[in-house]
Structures are given as structure tokens and as C-alpha cells.
Image (spheres, rainbow, N blue to C red):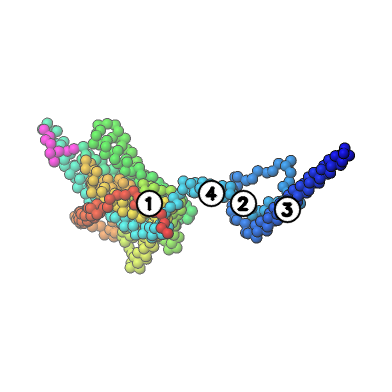
């Protein structure tokens, strides 16, 4: 019995060991099957991903992947070969896309901070085409305002000078006999002294500065100079002419202030000396300019004329590639208005001088042809300059209509009711027109024309007086007619003026797709 029990125990242990081995074998087979299935699925996914094209995105330059450590083990390939797999240049991730979006946003913010990128291109080109007509309308209106102001100095200022002299004589006569000077229209006021000083300055400059100068000597001196020297002279004259124009009106305003407010102060003497110095320097510069133009119009090779015309286009280079606002653009426009008036006056003076020296029909035709060339060059340079300035600074062409309203308001006297000067004082100050130096130049060239015209036969005194009175009467009639016409034009402009809107002068409309 004991042996039989031991045998049964051994059989049961053997059977349990066999069952355990079978169980382990079945688990190994299941694990092998799972591994095979997983490997097969992974291989299938790699084959599918290999057939798809990689996404094309840009990587951020400031956020690149960190280099792997040298001690880290190499990545194993999917086939389990143990080799390090190199990353493909077309492999990108979601972080790269987000970095690219952030960089684009930063770039757009920077672009909007340095320029206006939301303008309408079609609208801008439309305004570019409209600029020449708008500029020409404003320059024409300002030109006739300058003519009216110049005629005031020639025709109205002599009347005021004579009236002030009469009032001064009456005032001195009443003071001499200790009579009471009553208030009224015949009382001598301090403002009447301003007209006396103005005419005295014009006479002093003509007598002591221009009368000793011989035009023929200046003419031949300029004619024998080289082109380089003439170019330098013209450039210097243009620069100092602008400087003097900006200084002259302030000097005259200071003189008027000291005359009316502080007539017994020493500052009045200083103001008179400053105005005398300014008028002498500016008049001499303009005299050289007219003499240079006279040489250019009478030369056969027309090299000097080409030099004068080239100066207009050289001005484009110095103005177009700069940033301007509305105030800066108005200063350029005012300078162009004054330049046009001075060009017309200088050409008229040169024509008068040449006619007095003798010109036939052929010479007159040639002179008119050259005048047409000069005017066309002036128009073309102004159109190009203003068109590209407005285009580069995104300024609409409607800004020139606003400038016209500004000149119309100044000419009408709005906002300057308390001033006792002429009605054109405000607009002349805004434009920067030098009236007194131009009158001095005009007096000098008219005197030279009279000398050449009466060289063979001297007229009698009464004929001279009658001629001067007739010329003054014609200028007075032209002044009154032109003043009435400009006043009506200014009134119409102000009545038809729309409501001002700041957005109307900037091209900032977004382009509609």
C-alpha cells in the first residue's frame, strides 16, 4: 500500500508539470502572434504614408529644433535594423505651422507701422491723373492774385502816398499854429507813415543801388562767363531768392508794427534799416536773374536757355523723394505760384527792353517761340512734381481745392478785419511774394527801355508827364477790374465750399475685391 501511494503521487506531479508547460507554450504562441500582427500593421501604415506627398510649409528661422545629445542612443528604424534614420527635409510638424503664423502676424504689424498698406490702387491712380488739372487751376488763381497785388503797389500805393503827404502837411500846419487837430477822415494817423516809408524805400533803392548800374556792362559780363560759372550763379540766386522771400514779408510786418505801435522807439530805426538792407540785397539778386534771362533769350546757341530750363527739372529731384504733409505741400505750391509770376514779369521786362532797342518781326517770333518753350517746361515740371509728391504721400487731389479756399478767404479779408493794410496783404504774406524788390526791378528796366527808346529823339516834358499819367491810369483800371473779378471768384469759391473732412485728403479706402 505504501508503494502504491508513492506511485500515485509521482503521477499527479508529472501531470501538473505537463499542464504547466503546455500553458506557457500557449502564452508564447499568443505573444508571437500579437507581435507579428503589430509588425504587419506598422509595415502597412508605413507603406501607405510613403505614397502620400509631404506637406509644404516654411520653418521658423528663430525656432529650430534643438540638437540631440551626443550620449543619446540612435533612433531605431521601424524595421528594427538598429540604424539611425535621418530626418527628411519635407517632414514638418504642427509647431512649425504655428510659428509661421506668428511670424506673419509680426511682419504685418511692422508693415502697417511703417506705411499705409490699405489704400486703393485704382483710387490712387485716379487721383494721380487728376492732379495736373487741380494744380493748374490753383496756380492760375494764385497767379492772378499776385498780379493784383503787384498792380496795387504800382497803382494804389502812389495814391495812398500822395494822400498821406497831404494829411501830413495839414497836420504840420495845424501844429504850427497851435490849432486843435480834430478826429476824422482827414486826421494824420500812424498807419499813414507806413505808406510814406514804403515809397521812400523804393525810391532810395532805385536811386542809390540801381541807377549807378549799367545794364549793358552786366549783360556782357554774364555773356562771357563759362557755363559752369553761370550754373553756379543761377543756383545761388534761386537759393537766396527763396530765403529772401521768406524773410521779406516778416521784415515789412515788423516795420508796420513799430510804425503804428512804437513810432518814437529806436526799434523803428532798426526796422527801417533792416528793410532797406533786405530790399537792396533781394533786388540785386533779382536784377542779376533778369539779366541772365536776357542773355539766355538773346543767345543763338540756346545753351544758357537749356540751363535755365534744366533747373526746373532739377527741382523735381530735390522735392519728390521727401515726405510732406498738407502744410508742407502748400509751401511748395505757394513757391510755385510766386515763381510763375516772376517768370512772366521777367519775360515781359526782357521783351520791353528788346523792343526799345529794335526788334523786327522775325526776332519777335523767335522770342515768342522761346517764351513758349520756357512756359511749357515750367508747366510740365510743376505737373510732374506735384503728381508724384501726392502719389508718394497718399494725398488726394482735393487738397488743392482746399488751398484755393484758403487763398480766397485771405483775399476776401476774412479773419483780418482789424488790419488797416490793403486787402491783399494777408494773401501776399501767405504766398511770400516780394512786392517792393519787384517794383524796384520794374522801375530800373522801364527806365532803361525809355532811355533806349528815346535815344535819337528826346520828348518834351509835357509828353513825358502825359505818358506817365496815361500808363498809371491804365494800370489803375486794370487793378480795379482784376480786383473786382477776383473778389467775385473768391466769393463763389467760398459759397460753393463743401464741409471740410480730414478723410477727404487721404487715400485710405480699402480695395474692394
Sequence-first disc among 4 and 1: 4
Circle 3 is placed at which residue position? 33
**Disc ID at residue 92:** 2
In front: mark 3 or mark 4? 3
Q: Is residue 219 visible?
A: no
Along the line of sight, which residue is nearer the eye, 435 or 281? Answer: 435
Proximity of marks 4 and 1: CB atoms separated by less than 8 Å = no
Q: Classify residue 34 as left or right of residue 110.
A: right
Along the line of sight, which residue is nearer the eye, 320 or 172? Answer: 320
In front: mark 4 or mark 2? 2
Label 3 residue SS: helix
CA gap between label 3 and label 4 equals 46 Å
Q: Give how far across and how far down residue 260 sits, in percent.
A: 23, 36
Determine the image quadrant of residue 243: top left
As for residue 244 lying within the magenta part, the answer is no
Along the line of sight, which residue is nearer the eye, 139 or 95? Answer: 95
Circle 4 is placed at which residue position? 101
CA gap between label 4 and label 2 equals 14 Å
Residue occupying image coordinates x 63% and y 59%: 52
Chief secondary structure of the magenta portion: loop
Q: Give how far across and how far down residue 309 sits, in percent.
A: 42, 58
| Residue stretch rendered in magenta on the structure | 180-189
Q: Classify residue 349 as left or right of residue 156.
A: right
Circle 1 is placed at which residue position? 506
In front: mark 1 or mark 2? 2
As for residue 185 lying within the magenta part, the answer is yes
Sequence-first disc among 1 and 2: 2
Sequence-first disc among 3 and 4: 3
Amino acid at each position: 500500500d505504501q508503494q502504491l501511494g508513492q506511485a500515485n503521487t509521482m503521477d499527479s506531479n508529472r501531470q501538473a508539470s505537463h499542464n504547466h508547460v503546455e500553458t506557457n507554450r500557449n502564452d508564447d504562441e499568443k505573444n508571437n502572434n500579437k507581435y507579428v500582427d503589430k509588425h504587419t500593421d506598422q509595415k502597412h501604415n508605413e507603406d501607405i504614408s510613403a505614397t502620400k506627398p509631404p506637406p509644404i510649409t516654411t520653418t521658423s528661422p528663430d525656432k529650430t529644433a534643438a540638437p540631440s545629445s551626443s550620449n543619446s542612443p540612435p533612433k531605431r528604424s521601424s524595421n528594427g535594423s538598429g540604424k539611425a534614420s535621418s530626418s527628411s527635409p519635407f517632414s514638418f510638424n504642427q509647431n512649425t505651422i504655428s510659428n509661421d503664423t506668428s511670424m506673419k502676424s509680426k511682419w504685418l504689424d511692422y508693415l502697417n507701422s511703417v506705411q499705409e498698406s490699405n489704400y486703393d490702387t485704382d483710387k490712387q491712380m485716379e487721383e494721380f491723373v487728376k492732379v495736373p488739372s487741380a494744380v493748374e487751376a490753383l496756380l492760375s488763381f494764385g497767379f492772378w492774385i499776385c498780379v493784383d497785388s503787384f498792380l496795387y503797389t504800382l497803382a494804389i500805393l502812389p495814391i495812398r502816398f500822395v494822400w498821406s503827404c497831404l494829411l501830413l502837411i495839414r497836420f504840420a500846419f495845424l501844429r504850427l499854429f497851435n490849432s486843435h487837430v480834430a478826429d476824422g477822415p482827414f486826421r494824420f494817423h500812424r498807419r499813414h507813415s507806413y505808406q510814406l516809408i514804403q515809397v521812400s524805400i523804393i525810391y532810395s533803392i532805385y536811386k542809390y543801388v540801381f541807377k549807378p548800374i549799367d545794364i549793358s556792362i552786366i549783360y556782357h559780363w554774364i555773356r562771357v562767363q563759362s557755363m559752369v560759372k553761370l550754373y553756379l550763379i543761377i543756383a545761388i540766386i534761386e537759393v537766396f531768392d527763396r530765403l529772401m522771400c521768406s524773410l521779406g514779408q516778416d521784415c515789412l510786418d515788423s516795420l508796420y508794427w513799430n510804425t503804428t505801435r512804437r513810432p518814437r522807439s529806436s526799434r523803428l530805426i532798426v526796422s527801417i534799416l533792416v528793410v532797406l538792407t533786405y530790399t537792396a540785397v533781394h533786388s540785386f539778386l533779382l536784377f542779376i536773374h533778369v539779366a541772365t534771362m536776357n542773355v539766355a533769350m538773346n543767345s543763338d546757341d540756346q545753351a544758357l536757355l537749356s540751363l535755365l530750363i534744366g533747373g526746373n527739372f532739377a527741382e523735381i529731384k530735390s522735392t519728390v523723394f521727401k515726405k510732406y504733409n498738407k502744410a508742407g505741400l502748400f509751401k511748395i505750391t505757394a513757391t510755385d505760384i510766386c515763381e510763375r509770376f516772376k517768370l512772366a514779369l521777367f519775360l515781359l521786362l526782357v521783351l520791353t527792353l528788346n523792343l526799345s532797342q529794335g526788334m523786327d518781326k522775325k526776332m519777335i517770333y523767335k522770342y515768342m517761340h522761346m517764351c513758349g518753350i520756357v512756359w511749357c517746361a515750367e508747366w510740365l515740371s510743376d505737373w510732374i512734381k506735384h503728381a508724384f509728391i501726392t502719389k508718394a504721400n497718399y494725398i488726394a487731389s482735393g487738397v488743392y481745392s482746399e488751398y484755393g479756399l484758403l487763398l480766397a478767404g485771405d483775399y476776401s479779408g476774412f479773419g483780418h478785419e482789424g488790419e488797416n493794410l490793403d486787402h491783399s496783404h494777408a494773401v501776399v504774406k501767405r504766398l511770400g511774394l516780394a512786392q517792393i524788390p519787384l517794383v524796384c526791378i520794374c522801375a530800373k528796366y522801364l527806365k532803361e527801355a525809355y532811355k533806349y527808346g528815346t535815344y535819337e529823339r528826346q520828348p518834351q516834358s509835357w509828353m513825358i508827364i502825359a505818358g506817365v499819367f496815361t500808363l498809371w491810369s491804365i494800370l489803375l483800371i486794370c487793378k480795379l477790374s482784376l480786383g473786382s473779378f477776383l473778389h467775385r471768384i473768391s466769393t463763389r469759391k467760398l459759397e460753393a465750399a463743401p464741409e471740410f473732412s480730414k478723410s477727404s485728403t487721404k487715400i485710405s479706402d480699402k480695395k474692394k475685391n
